[in-house]
Amino acid sequence: MKYFFAVLIIAVSFSCKKEDAKKQADVDEGIIVQYISDNNLNATATGSGLYYTMDITGSGAACNSNSTVKVAYQGYFTDGSVFDESSQAGITFGLQSVIKGWTEGIPYFKVGGSGKLLIPSALGYGTQGSGSIPPNSVLIFNIELIEVL
């Protein structure tokens, strides 16, 4: 009988976490859709909560979620406050070592391509946040894919 209650408590706990995650996903979706509307963007939804825009399509090599890439970027919140940016020369990293929004979103670009990634908190830094990024933050990144290595 005591095992039944332990299993029940665990099940309720997971259920509450799923409900909280769904509520946050809905909040993030509303923030992103409003940002798209306010800024007159032509954004594409990927189905995971991520949206992207393509300013320049690019004609170079494509990458995938396992690629190592060189990217120039600027990261900011929906209010326009910049929290991070690279130099024009960009930075090099493996797409498996970054936030999920980049792992999923950067492969939409080809070398020479640029645009925006509009990332819900679950694909960014989630409920924990990171450094100057508060928990449950929607993140916007201007992206230019410079090279696929």
Image (tube, helix red, strand yellow):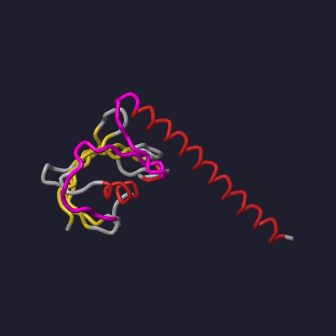
Whether residue 128 is visible to the viewer of this picture, yes or no, is: no
Which residue sits furthest top?
38
Is residue 137 shown to the viewer in this render?
A: yes
Quadrant assignment, res 6: bottom right
Instruction: State the residue at coordinates (26%, 62%).
Output: 62
In the picture, the quarter occupied by the C terminus is bottom left
x and y percentages locating residue 104 in the rendered image: 38, 58
In this view, the residue farthest toward the right is 1
Residue 135: x, y in percent? 46, 46
Magenta stretch, overall SS: loop
Task: Name the residue furthest left.
Answer: 89
Q: Quadrant of the N terminus?
A: bottom right
Q: Which residues are magenta?
A: 37-64
Q: Nearer the viewer, residue 27 or 82?
A: 27
Above-or-below relation of 98 to 58:
below
- Residue 149 falls within the magenta-colored stretch: no
53 within the magenta span: yes
x then y, percent, for residue 4: 82, 68
Residue 76 is situated, as x and y percent measured from the top left of the image, at 31, 41
Quick one: 10 or 112, which is closer to the camera?
112
Residue 132 picture quarter: top left
Q: Depth check: 52 or 78 in front?
A: 52
Where is residue 39, by image quadrant? Answer: top left
59 vs 67, left or right, is left
Q: How many marks?
A: 0
